[in-house]
Image (cartoon, coloured by chain):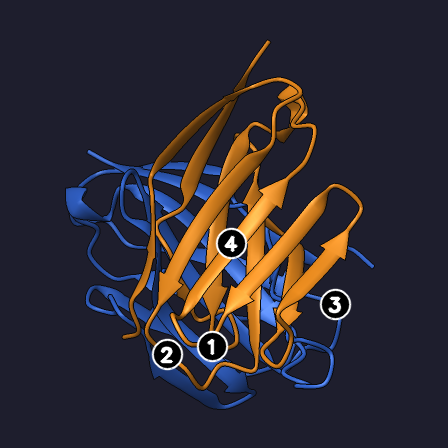
Amino acid sequence: NAGVTQTPKFQVLKTGQSMTLQCAQDMNHEYMSWYRQDPGMGLRLIHYSVGAGITDQGEVPNGYNVSRSTTEDFPLRLLSAAPSQTSVYFCASSPLSGADGDEQFFGPGTRLTVL
Amino acid sequence: GEDVEQSLFLSVREGDSSVINCTYTDSSSTYLYWYKQEPGAGLQLLTYIFSNMDMKQDQRLTVLLNKKDKHLSLRIADTQTGDSAIYFCAVTYALNFGKGTSLLVTP
């Protein structure tokens, strides 16, 4: 299993540009999520999904869109990038099985800089 | 969201014990987690404790849970330089993370 994969690893955007951060998992996990990590702020939840076709907002959803058309993929879209979105983005997945402790498996992250 | 509080920094000498503390507000969590993040990498689950347990030991790691005070701690015995990382406490299906404690281990 490849686990959780994220592309790209690094990205530089200009203000106003759009892009999609890709996330895929091959563990057949129902739950997937996106976090951003900023210095001194820890991890903040952007959006999450409990299954294909179901998404919901986290703590900091503004400026981001998500969709979940398949169990495997959970892309994060920035429609009009802003410097405040400069951050490291992590995708994670979990089986949501309850009995297994619901460990989240994290991707390696995407480091995004918006100029 | 739920509040999960951690101290931001901890520095210890190699060979000493490290204790990282966490307080939380959500008392309904079934599991409470500790994640480790090494530089430039994503988070990895280090250990977790079921909410009806007081203590869990796993090699050099000891997790203590005080449900009454909503306090969770992670003790690392014989801390090594390779333990230098950021440690995150998390509750509620790990949807809620603390800000992370940066552990620096000095020789």
Q: Label 2, on which residue?
A: B26
- Residue B78: quadrant of the picture: top right
**A27 to B42, vertically: above or below:** below
Q: Label 4, on which residue?
A: B73
Q: Position of residue B26 (x, y in %)?
A: 37, 79
Q: Label 3, on which residue?
A: A26
Separation of residues labelled 1 and 3 (CA atoms):
24 Å
Between tags 1 and 3, which lies in front? 1
Separation of residues labelled 2 and 3 (CA atoms):
31 Å
Between tags 4 and 3, which lies in front? 4
Quarter in which the N terminus of chain A is drawn: bottom right
Q: Label 1, on which residue?
A: B92
Between tags 2 and 4, which lies in front? 4
Evaluate whether label 1 is on the same chain as label 2.
yes
**A69 to B6, vertically: above or below:** below
Q: Amino acid at mark 2?
A: Asp
**Local secondary structure at mark 2:** loop
Query: Label 3 lies in what chain?
Result: A
**Marks 1 and 2 in Cβ contact (< 8 Å):** yes
Query: Label 4 lies in what chain?
Result: B
Between tags 4 and 1, which lies in front? 4
- Residue A113: quadrant of the picture: top left
Q: Position of residue A22 (x, y in %)?
A: 51, 58
- Nearer the N terminus, badge 1 or badge 2? 2
Q: Position of residue A75 (x, y in %)?
A: 47, 66
